[in-house]
Amino acid sequence: MNTAHQIAEFRQAGRHTLNEAVSKQLLADYGIPVVRETVLHNADEACRHAAALGFPVVLKGVGDRLTHKTERNLVHIGLDSADAVREAFAAIRTAGGDDWQGCLLQPMVVGRRELVAGLFRDAQFGPVVMFGLGGIFTEAIGDVVFRIAPIDERQALQMAEELTAAAILEAFRGEAAVDRDQLATTLTGLSRLAMDHPQIAEVDINPLIVGADGRLTAVDALVVLTAAQSTPDPASPAPEARRQDAQAIIAALDRMCRPRSIAVVGASRPKPDGFPGMYGCIRNFGFPGNLYPINPNTPEIDGVQTYPDLVSLPEPVDLVVISVPGPRVPAALRDCVASGNQRVHIFSSGFKETGEPEGIRLQEELAAIAAEGALHVVGPNCMGIHVPASRLLTWVNASDISGPLAFVSQSGGHAQDFCNIAVRKFGLHFSKVFSYGNALTLDSTDFLAYLAQDDETRIIAMYLEGVKDGRLLREQVTAINRTKPIVILKGGMTASGARTVASHTGSMAGGEKIWRAFFRQTGAVPVATLDEMAEVAAALHYLPPCHGRNVAILGTGGGIGVAAADSCSRVGLALPALTDEMMQQLRRFIPPAGNMIRNPIDAHIVLLQLELLGPTLQLLAQADDLDMFVLSLHLDWLQNMEAGAHIDKIAAFVAHQARQYLNGKPLVVAWRQYQPNPAIQASRERLEATLKEAGVPVYEGLDRALSALAKTAAYHAFQKTAAGQSTSERQWDN
């Protein structure tokens, strides 16, 4: 009987798990090393087989409905004689009752190291493979890692390297290292099993015992099935249908981003104070096309003729913006269908995001109307689209300068805030900004597909809360990230992953751990705040590629050394010691008194005598084991030099001369200020303005600078790995 047929029979019988014998046979079919075992039905044959196998042995009850075996006295280990086997068989037969179907006889597998492996199906990402430390303390220890299936051998072995206690997989207390080939076969086998059999909800192998010779043996396994009435993971549309749908979405978004005409449903006369409304925002930003106000209750707005509905317009428009109370949105959306206007932004709120039955019902009604009219909808409950080149803006203030950065945000507030942060702090301007809220029809993956082919976009930032199709997102991000870096702030990771499952595997997952796997597999850069998103985006945009993780820091103050070493360690960077030859060469510029040549380099004189800074940087940049540089400026101390004018000189040197000495390696500036002195603040603001204009990233404090460099280096390292070059997998835990 084939596997699919067996699974179908179990599901049709209303059984949610395979029995242990069938489970392990299924795993063995996928190359997973399982314990040798025999199903026996009477005590005499159990004794004969045990004698042939060799004592001690293990005897377990087996049955389609037998679960929680230890608690029911259905597992007897260390049986060292035929009498012990006979006694255990009788006890198991009695304890199993009507659910008993036989006994499993196994050799007593002994190992001092126990691992766990398994899989489960995540609501967003589908099948996920898990690996970690096993045994009875698996959940308490929680040292597990995940990968979204399918995975290959390289990814399987990387999972092992990520365990906190990865050393336990090496030669350990006289025992051999874990067989890496077996481990890779086990994890890739679970991946193939998940992809081949969508009716399997979970697999739990615990313990996966490591023998003294390093070989693996699965001595216990649980396979959980989806309910008979449930459907398997949704199949992806046929490639041609998916391609055509993507092309239609891209074409629609392009019209929305380059509109020649816009209609605002619910347009009102902008108030002299307060929010001017959608119509006022678009008008005030200087939209050059036809802007039609839709309002049946007034004949004009500021001298511009209004229209009662979309059908009354003299032309179909490229974009309809709906800004009416929630209960009136369905009628407005039907007007879009009736007038042939398929591209819509719904600003209005009061739908699914409320969690209230009426809001949910309203959104379901909107979804039905949108499907009927084949509408492409941004929103509801969102700020919409900002395109500087098209003079399109649906909030109050933003830069009208186009730039290389795109932002896709589920939050309208984050869209506005991030635009301000990136422009103000780093001079980073935007190509496109999408705030899409509840994602009625257009989701993050649709905006990604559009931005992938957008020549104006070179870096993509995203704020995500929920994802409709995690597998598609993974596929897209992996592909796009190779040429356009993608930086993601994921909101609500901890709460989003909570769920109850039957096995260890899913219960230890949680949204955060799966998203961590997503980042490791795709190469996308995770950040924790909007500020960090801007800091990383600036480093990715302005700096040349980082070819390693070794950093040199040039600054002032001995205490900086300890703090810098700690900061580098936290983010996965290294502070290599300078060679004796390098230190001797640097002594030509830096005298011993008051200047420590280590790494970090405490060199007051180099910052005071700027003619020495260039040669110092040039020497450092020639070192093969130094990949990037941080210039750390203590502004309180520097302010004493020429009443702050020396800070201006440093800024000018870094902005206009420093890069010629760097041999193509990255340099950033980090400042620290401790006194709330207005003069120091003014000097700092001039420093930041000069460096921003020159495209030199400048950060408040070493921690921010080092974190941005670390994540930039990690991005470039991942791309080398993706291109097949030899490099270690980057670390995203900082």
Image (cartoon, rainbow, N blue to C red):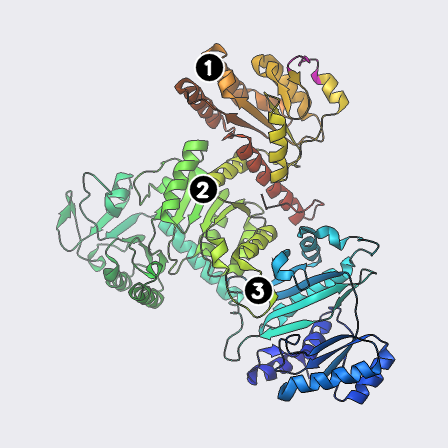
Q: Nearer the viewer, residue 68 or 233?
A: 68
Estimate the spatial distance between the alpha carbons at disc 3 and disc 2, rounded to whole Å: 30 Å
Q: Nearer the viewer, residue 451 or 639?
A: 639
User: Residue at image x 57%, y 55%?
Assistant: 513
Callout 3: few (<14), some (14-19), or many (20+) C-alpha neighbours within 10 Å? many
Q: Which quarter of the rendering shows the C terminus?
A: top right
- The disc, 3 or 1, on the residue closer to the chain's N-terminal end is 3
Who is closer to the viewer here, 556 or 373?
Answer: 556
Q: On the picture, is 217 further left or further right than 602?
A: right
Q: How many marks?
A: 3
Report the predominant secondary structure element of the magenta stretch.
loop
Q: Name the residue beneath numbered marker 2.
A: 530
Q: Quadrant of residue 59?
A: bottom right
The residue carrying mark 3 is 506
The region drawn magenta spans 586-594
Which tag, 3 or 2, sits closer to the chain's start? 3
- Label 2's element? helix
Residue 644 numbered mark, or none:
1
Rendered location of residue 144, percent (x, y): 63, 57
Instruction: Give the vertical position of 489 relative to 470 (above or below).
Output: above
Q: Is residue 591 magenta?
A: yes
